Image: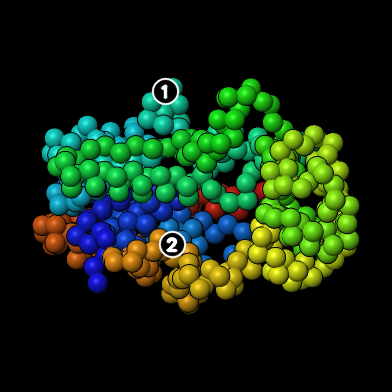
């Protein structure tokens, strides 16, 4: 059975998450993805983060998540031979995918303007922090700063406390979706119209896309919406998260009919809700016609009700009510065991030296006739140098030069790090 992107070759020069995750989607859909890494590799190989007790030298979870199934070439593009290798790989590439900033791309001669004449059919797909135009086009970006500039951080948390970061790097990963979507759109356009082109998107643009409704509401109404903690700033009524007796949490979103509303009122020992004219329709229960005072009253009744029963009692009851839209709030550890996610093959297994078999998120898009599939482990740094550079036309001498240069760069950096460590050991300030 064919995969949708069979025959598409992607040359990827990316770091961290936003760029690599776009390449990951293309790889799962059947494209060949060759990741060009500098002598030390993509820095995300070494992001150990919190509570990581894997053996020293184990490839980091961030790299595993975004780079499984790709090939890796390791070279120093500042050298003549390194640059020749990249251009040799571009000759038969369909897509050049990158999240390097434009000044760096220009310095390497890999910006769109430098490549479009040599490779007119090439799709040059890039993503940056704040968009390709404007005074901050070249400003550095990490997920939280884009979420802050886009307004998402301001609207997250409680009104009487400081703003909160979301609990995951959603701008980076959603930005990757936008980049993958833009790349796929350009692939279709080339098939139909015969032209390569530049694809550009950004983390800021992604933050805006994720908040289309909320931003449009503010633009149309002039509203000044306060962040609302366990609830949504633009939704009155009960929509929100409620704590149970055993400190679990249930997200209650909607009750779709009168019978389910009566059942909820009875189970919650809140019989007054069944008859209260303010809450009798789905629209009312999502805030239609409700005052702030009525919303506060409704939420207080439900907070008391949820706190009176254990999580499993609520889960057992709610599963009997198909017209109630709800879900148990799950930890990441619980999500990894979720039978629904596994039933849909949303996780895949990779084998990581030092760890063994471990789970990561797999291919989430299902196609009936040409399905994609997860493509295996993340690559070791430079594992594809010999095979892929030979296929691109480089000589054995050139490949050896590339590998020797990369090794020398790594050794030099290691020596500098040892010097810094030694200096720190000698310098013992008084505290």
The location of residue 23, given as percent across then percent down, is 35, 54
Alpha-carbon distance for marks 2 and 1?
35 Å
Q: Which of the two residues, 275 or 14, is positioned nearer the viewer here?
A: 275
The residue pinned by badge 1 equals: 134
Residue 177 shown left or right of residue 302 in the figure:
left
Q: Which of the two residues, 425 or 116, is positioned nearer the viewer here?
A: 116
Q: Residues within 10 Å of mark 2 (few under 14, many from 20)?
A: some
Image quadrant for the N terminus? bottom left
Q: Residues within 10 Å of mark 1 (few under 14, many from 20)?
A: few
Image quadrant for the C terminus? top right
Judging from the image, the colouring scheme is rainbow
Residue 320 shown left or right of residue 418 in the figure:
right
- The residue positioned 19% from the left and 66% from the top of the image is 387
| Residue 29 in view | yes
The residue pinned by badge 2 equals: 364
- Considering the numbered disc 1 on the image, is that residue within a helix, a strand or a loop? loop
């Amino acid at each position: 059975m064919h995969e949708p992107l069979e025959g598409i070759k992607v040359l990827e020069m990316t770091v961290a998450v936003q760029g690599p995750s776009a390449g990951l989607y293309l790889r799962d859909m059947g494209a060949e993805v060759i990741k060009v890494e500098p002598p030390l590799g993509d820095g995300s190989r070494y992001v150990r983060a919190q509570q990581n007790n894997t053996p020293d030298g184990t490839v980091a979870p961030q790299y595993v998540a975004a780079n499984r199934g790709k090939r890796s070439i390791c070279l120093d593009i500042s050298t003549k031979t390194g640059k020749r290798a990249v251009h040799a790989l571009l000759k038969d590439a369909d897509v050049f995918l990158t999240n390097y900033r434009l000044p760096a791309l220009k310095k390497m001669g890999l910006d769109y303007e430098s490549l479009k004449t040599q490779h007119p059919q090439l799709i040059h797909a890039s993503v940056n922090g704040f968009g390709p135009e404007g005074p901050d086009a070249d400003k550095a970006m990490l997920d939280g700063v884009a979420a802050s500039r886009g307004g998402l951080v301001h609207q997250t948390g409680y009104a009487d406390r400081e703003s909160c970061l979301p609990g995951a790097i959603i701008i980076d990963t959603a930005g990757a979706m936008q980049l993958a979507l833009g790349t796929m759109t350009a692939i279709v356009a080339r098939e139909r119209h015969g032209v390569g082109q530049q694809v550009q998107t950004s983390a800021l643009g992604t933050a805006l896309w994720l908040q289309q409704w909320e931003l449009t509401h503010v633009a149309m109404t002039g509203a000044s919406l306060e962040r609302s903690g366990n609830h949504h700033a633009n939704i009155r009524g009960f929509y929100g998260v409620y704590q149970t007796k055993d400190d679990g949490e249930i997200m209650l979103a909607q009750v779709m009919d009168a019978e389910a509303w009566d059942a909820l009122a009875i189970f919650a020992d809140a019989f007054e809700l069944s008859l209260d004219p303010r809450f009798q329709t789905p629209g009312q229960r999502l805030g239609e016609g409700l005052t702030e005072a009525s919303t506060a009253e409704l939420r207080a009744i439900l907070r008391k009700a949820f706190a009176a029963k254990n999580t499993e009692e609520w889960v057992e009851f709610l599963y009997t009510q198909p017209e109630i839209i709800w879900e148990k709030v799950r930890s990441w550890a619980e999500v990894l065991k979720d039978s629904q996610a596994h039933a849909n093959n949303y996780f895949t297994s990779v084998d990581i030296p030092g760890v063994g078999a471990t789970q990561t998120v797999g291919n989430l898009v299902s196609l009936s006739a040409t399905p994609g599939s997860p493509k295996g482990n993340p690559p070791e740094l430079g594992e594809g140098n010999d095979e892929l550079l030979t296929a691109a036309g480089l000589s054995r001498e050139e490949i050896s030069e590339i590998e020797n240069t990369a090794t020398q760069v790594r050794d030099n950096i290691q020596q500098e790090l040892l010097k810094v460590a030694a200096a720190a050991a000698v310098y013992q300030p008084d505290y």
